[in-house]
Image: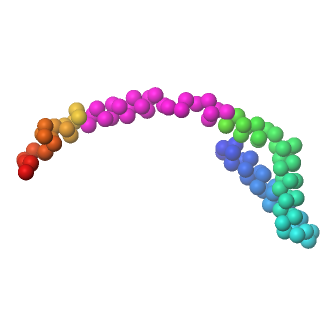
Amino acid sequence: MSPWIKYSVVRLGLFALTLGLLLGAGMWWWLAAVVASIIAMTVSYIFFASLRDAVALDVHSRRTQPAVDTDAVAEDGTHEDDTYENGAAEDSNADGTTAGETRP
C-alpha cells in the first residue's frame, strides 16, 4: 500500500474518532471540527513520524525522476516511422488525392 494512502487513512481516522468523541460530549459542531483537526494534526505529527517520512521520501523520489522518458520518446518516433514503412502513405498521390481519385 502506498505511504500516501496509509498516512491519509490514519489522519482521517484520527480526525473522525476525535470529532465523534467531541460531538458526543456535546460540543458545537464547528468548534468540535476545529479542535479535532488540531488534535489530529498534533498527534499525527508526534506519533506517526515514520509514515510522514515515508511520504516525504516518496515525494522526493517522484520529484527526482526525469521529466521526459527518453525511451518512450524514442519509441514514439519509431512508431511514426512504421506508419510509412507499412504502406499507409503509399496510397496517396503527390497532389494529395488517393488512388483512383481525381481532383476537380
Note whether residue 50 is visible: yes
Was residue 73 drawn as part of the magenta stretch in this picture? yes
Note whether residue 91 is visible: no
Residue occupying the point 91% across, 71% down: 26
Residue occupying the point 85% across, 59% down: 34
Furthest-right residue in this view: 25
**Front residue of 6 and 65:** 65
Q: Is residue 37 left or right of residue 78?
A: right
Q: Position of residue 96 (x, y in %)?
A: 16, 42
Residue occupying the point 80% across, 60% down: 16
Using the image, determine if residue 7 lies above or below residue 32.
above
Numbered-mark total: 0
Was residue 63 drawn as part of the magenta stretch in this picture? yes
Q: Quadrant of the N terminus?
A: top right
Furthest-bottom residue in this view: 26
Q: Position of residue 13 (x, y in %)?
A: 78, 56
Task: Indicate the quadrant where residue 81 lies.
Answer: top left
Residue occupying the point 19% across, 38% down: 89
Using the image, determine if residue 22 lies above or below residue 4.
below
Residue range of the region highlighted in magenta in the rendering = 60-83
Q: Position of residue 83 (x, y in %)?
A: 26, 37
